[in-house]
Image (cartoon, rainbow, N blue to C red):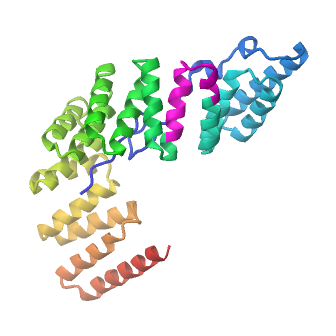
């Protein structure tokens, strides 16, 4: 029974990444302060115009066009550090992490204390899967700006991802101090405690979330999982049901409910839960085998064999991919 994974700061879903920041000054750079380069004033005016067009394209998600404009601007005026910063953001949005990293490093060469560039560089490394380097730059961001909330969140998640749970707990506790009302931090802290085997502490964090938001789906599901893992089936059953009251398509909760219904020999309820689970998450092919077992327990051999056959077919297909 899996707990919901670490949740990034701006998403109430299974994680994993926090999008790059868009500081207001990046998208509202004054044309007169966009950098001074070499060359005559006419060329500099062209560079500023390209830069402004790039920002305009980026606002509408037209990142290919934005990249073209930023590059043209930088050809004329390579000293526009804001253009490098926005160039990195555009690369990041396109999933071109190596290019984004190069751009953000260029910013830091000129502005070692730029916390936005340092944070964005950490985010690019994080999404690339290079968590050690991500940690270095999230730490650097916090050194520059001790109250940088996003850096604390992502540093805690990065530590947890590589199994440094004590460090993750320390950082996430600091994140709580910076913003005591951010529920996702309590959820992430609870998940780290659970990964460390500290279920009592995890439960306390999830309970704190429910005190603030009684209908929080992730907290309800994670409490159910803790109870399930501890063998407290009735409490698990209660919290899984509360979870699907909030979101009936929660595949994990429906699947676990199906398992409990089967234990209770409530076969029709089990089939219903399993079917909802597989509709919400078709990739969980084990559900077909579970449904087959329920029909077998009901003495419905033909239906059971159909699902067992489907399970074998799906398993074979998955292995061939």
- Total of numbered circles in the picture? 0
- On the question of residue 161 being in view, the answer is yes
Q: Identify whether 11 is placed above or below 272.
A: above
- On the question of residue 20 being in view, the answer is no
Q: Is residue 316 left or right of residue 207?
A: right
Question: Which residue, as the protein is rendered here, is positioned at the far top?
Answer: 32
Is residue 299 inside the magenta stretch?
A: no
The residue that appears at 48% across and 30% down in the rendered structure is: 137
The residue that appears at 81% across and 29% down in the rendered structure is: 75
Is residue 116 inside the magenta stretch?
A: yes
Q: Magenta residues?
A: 106-125
Q: Nearer the viewer, residue 115 or 246?
A: 115
- Residue 303 x/y as whole percent: 29, 83
Q: Nearer the viewer, residue 103 or 241?
A: 103
The residue that appears at 43% across and 40% down in the rendered structure is: 132
Q: Is residue 314 left or right of residue 114?
A: left
- Residue 58 x/y as whole percent: 68, 33
Q: Quadrant of the N terminus?
A: bottom left
Q: Is residue 21 left or right of residue 45?
A: left
Q: Identify whether 14 is placed above or below 57.
A: below
Question: Which residue, as the protein is rendered here, is positioned at the far front?
Answer: 109
Q: Write down the quadrant of residue 45 in the picture.
A: top right
- Residue 62 x/y as whole percent: 70, 38
The residue that appears at 17% across and 69% down in the rendered structure is: 262
Q: Write down the quadrant of residue 199 in the picture.
A: top left
Predominant secondary structure, magenta span: helix
- Residue 310 x/y as whole percent: 38, 80
């Amino acid at each position: 029974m899996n707990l919901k994974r670490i949740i990034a700061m701006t998403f109430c879903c299974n994680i994993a990444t926090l999008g790059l920041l868009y500081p207001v000054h990046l998208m509202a750079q004054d044309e007169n302060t966009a950098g001074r380069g070499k060359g005559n004033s006419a060329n500099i005016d062209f560079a500023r115009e390209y830069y402004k067009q790039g920002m305009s394209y980026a606002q509408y998600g037209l990142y290919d066009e934005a990249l073209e404009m930023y590059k043209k601007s930088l050809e004329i005026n390579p000293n526009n550090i804001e253009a490098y910063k926005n160039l990195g953001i555009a690369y990041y949005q396109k999933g071109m992490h190596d290019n984004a990293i190069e751009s953000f490093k260029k910013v830091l060469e000129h502005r070692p204390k730029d916390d936005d560039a340092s944070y964005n560089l950490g985010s690019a490394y994080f999404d690339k899967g290079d968590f050690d380097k991500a940690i270095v730059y999230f730490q650097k961001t916090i050194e520059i700006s001790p109250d940088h909330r996003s850096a604390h969140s992502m540093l805690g998640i990065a530590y947890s991802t590589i199994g440094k749970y004590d460090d993750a707990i320390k950082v996430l506790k600091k994140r709580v101090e910076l913003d005591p009302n951010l529920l996702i931090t309590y959820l992430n802290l609870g998940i780290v405690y659970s990964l460390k085997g500290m279920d009592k502490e995890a439960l306390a964090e999830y309970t704190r979330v429910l005190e603030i938001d009684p209908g929080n789906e992730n907290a309800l599901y994670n409490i159910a999982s803790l109870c399930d893992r501890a063998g407290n089936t009735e409490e698990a059953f209660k919290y899984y049901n509360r979870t699907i009251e909030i979101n009936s398509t929660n595949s994990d909760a429906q699947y676990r409910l199906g398992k409990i219904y089967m234990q209770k020999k409530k076969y029709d309820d089990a089939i219903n839960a399993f079917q909802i689970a597989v509709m919400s998450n078709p990739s969980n092919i084990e559900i077909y085998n579970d449904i087959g077992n329920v029909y077998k327990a009901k003495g419905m051999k033909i239906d059971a064999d159909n699902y067992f056959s489907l399970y074998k077919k799906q398993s074979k297909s998955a292995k061939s991919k």
